[in-house]
Image (spheres, helix red, strand yellow):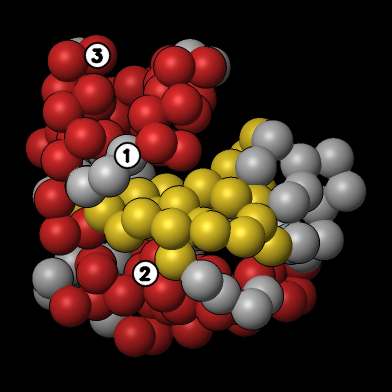
Amino acid sequence: MLSEMIKEEFIQLELEVTDWEEAIRKSAEPLLIGGKITSEYIEKIIETTQKIGPYIVITKNVALPHAPTQYGALDLAMGITTLKTPVKSGNKTNDPVKYLFCMSAKDSETHLESMAELVNLLSDQTFYHVLDTAKKPMDILDYIIESE
């Protein structure tokens, strides 16, 4: 379940960043500190984005920073970051990015159920309201748990 991937300390609210690269680094930081990814994983996300474009931008205002498991995904986890000021990623259709869901999966299957739950949340306008108005990380995590 999605709530099992997300810990309170992986949720960051209203971060200030200057560009998409800093947004990726900051969104991945809690997973790095939590031992879920390596610094190589973060560098691979940025390198891949520079090479092929904003593949991580999955819908309007939403990015899902991730890289192949062999580049330092140590455990199943997801962080949620909201930005105070949205950033441009280069994805003309879905820019600017305001919400980042940094994900780590140690294989290609264990995260699939959680991803389906995330897709459902991303089609729920109330979820965006929760992301925008949360005063503390548990406000978001509580909503996710209630939605499961």
Foreground label between 1 and 2 = 1
| Residue 129 screen position, x and y as percent | 46, 26
Image vertical order of residue 52 relative to residue 1, above or below: below
- What residue is shown at x 51% (from left), y 48% (from top)? 99
In which quadrant will I find the N terminus? Answer: top left
- What residue is shown at x 64% (from left), y 78% (from top)? 18
Structural distance between the alpha carbons of marks 3 and 1? 16 Å
- What residue is shown at x 53% (from left), y 59% (from top)? 84
Which of the 4 quarters of the picture holds residue 110?
top left
Which of the 4 quarters of the picture holds residue 35?
bottom left
* Secondary structure state at the residue bearing disc 1: loop
Relative placement, left or right, of 56 versus 91 is left
Structural distance between the alpha carbons of marks 2 and 3? 24 Å
| Residue 143 screen position, x and y as percent | 23, 24
Give the residue type that dot 1 points to: Ala
Give the residue number, with chain letter if any, for mark 3. 147
Residue nearest the observer in this picture, 136 or 87? 136
| Disc nearer the start of the sequence (3/1) | 1
| Disc nearer the start of the sequence (2/3) | 2
Give the residue number, with chain letter if any, for mark 2. 28
What mark, if any, has residue 134 been given in the picture? 1
Give the residue type that dot 2 points to: Ala
Which of the 4 quarters of the picture holds residue 21?
bottom right
- Estimate how packed mark 2 is, as few (under 14), some (14 to 19) or many (20 or more) residues with alpha carbons within 10 Å: many
Foreground label between 3 and 1 = 1
Give the residue type that dot 3 points to: Ser
Residue 6 in view (yes/no): yes
Residue 106 in view (yes/no): no
Residue nearest the observer in this picture, 66 or 27? 27
